[in-house]
Amino acid sequence: MKVFVVGAGMAGHALVEELLKAGQAVEIHLFGEERSLPYNRIFLSDIIAGRKLPSQLILKSYQRYEEEGVKLHLGERMERIFPDTKKIITSRGSVYSYDRLVLALGSVPSMPPVKGVEKKGVFTFRNMGDVYGILEMARVSKRAVVIGGGLLGVELSSALREAGLDVSLVHILDRLMEQWLDETASRMLSRKLEGMGIRVLLGSRTVEVMGERKAEGIRLSNGEVLEGDFVVFATGVRPNTSLAVASGLKVNRGILVNDFLETSAQD
């Protein structure tokens, strides 16, 4: 049986491991849009802070996958699934046939309606490609603006500060990490970050990324301008449903499944 796992993140990697443990005669294909091997995205901020190397986040080597018979398709985005014929087509124009297909697509960054996000020097913080871009800009910069005061925004601000940059952390609500912390704990976190030299602005809505072609800061809804050499949006995520939509699967806020995690398409 040929099983395709679409999504080479932590969930896709974990499923491949379970299929290998089952010891059945299964031909496993792992598809990932990123060129990188599956890695532990939890520690992305540690790379920016200089605490870890990218290689230390890799979950398994090419050699190990090859020894286990797992066929890797990295840097190859799946464009569409044809459930009736059990075929798929990828961004390289390749067509493959499968017996079972599992979607482990995860999420994508959720961007607020802010003018100027297409400018050079504007990043999201979700994958290894984002990290490489932020690191490249940080090496030639002194000031960074991080938008979003959730877990990722707080971690990234701390990491950039550790890397020696002046950091402004902007959050639209009146306390940091409001989904995890109560008001008292959030105030303690704000004081901790400020003690590290991070400027924390709460209750502040970003309306525009300033600069002509390259980011030079942001403008807030009250008219205040914060200068920065680059801007990172850490404003949450949303389900990655684009492949499911293109393939005609039932989707609401995410991909719809039944009690057995089966989508609206068989197999």
Image (cartoon, helix red, strand yellow):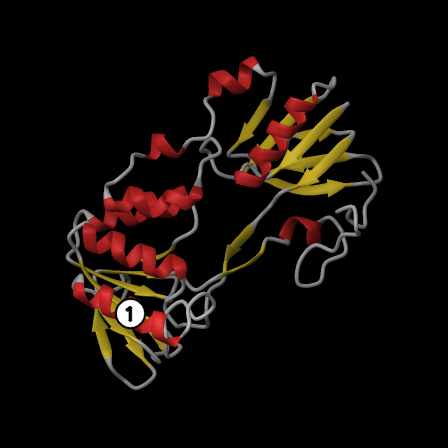
Please tell me which residue is depicted at 55% across the width and 13% down the height of the picture: 67
- Judging depth in this view, the residue of 148 and 82 nearest the camera is 148
Q: What residue is shown at x 57% (from left), y 48% (from top)?
A: 106
Q: Is residue 121 visible?
A: no
Q: Residue at x 51, y 34 (%)?
A: 75
Left or right: residue 185 versus residue 248 is left
How many discs mark residues in the rendered view? 1
Left-right relation of 246 to 207: right
Q: Residue furthest front?
A: 184
Above or below residue 211? Residue 109 is above
Quadrant of the rendered image containing residue 195? bottom left
Would residue 163 be seen by someone viewing this image from the given angle? yes
Q: Amino acid at mark 1?
A: Met
Residue where numbered disc 1 is placed: 188
Vertical arrangement, residue 143 with respect to residue 44, above or below: below
Classify 171 as above or below 71: below
Q: Residue furthest top?
A: 67
Q: Badge 1: how crowded within 10 Å, few (<14), some, or many (20+)?
A: few
Secondary structure beneath dot 1 equals: helix
Q: Nearer the viewer, residue 205 or 149?
A: 149
| Quadrant in the picture for the C terminus | top right
Q: Is residue 127 left or right of residue 52?
A: right
Picture coordinates of residue 103 (x, y %)? 67, 42
Residue at x 56%, y 33% (from the top left corner): 13
> Could you say which quadrant of the image residue 207 lies in?
bottom left
Q: Nearer the viewer, residue 181 or 163?
A: 181
Locate residue 160: give its quadrant: bottom left
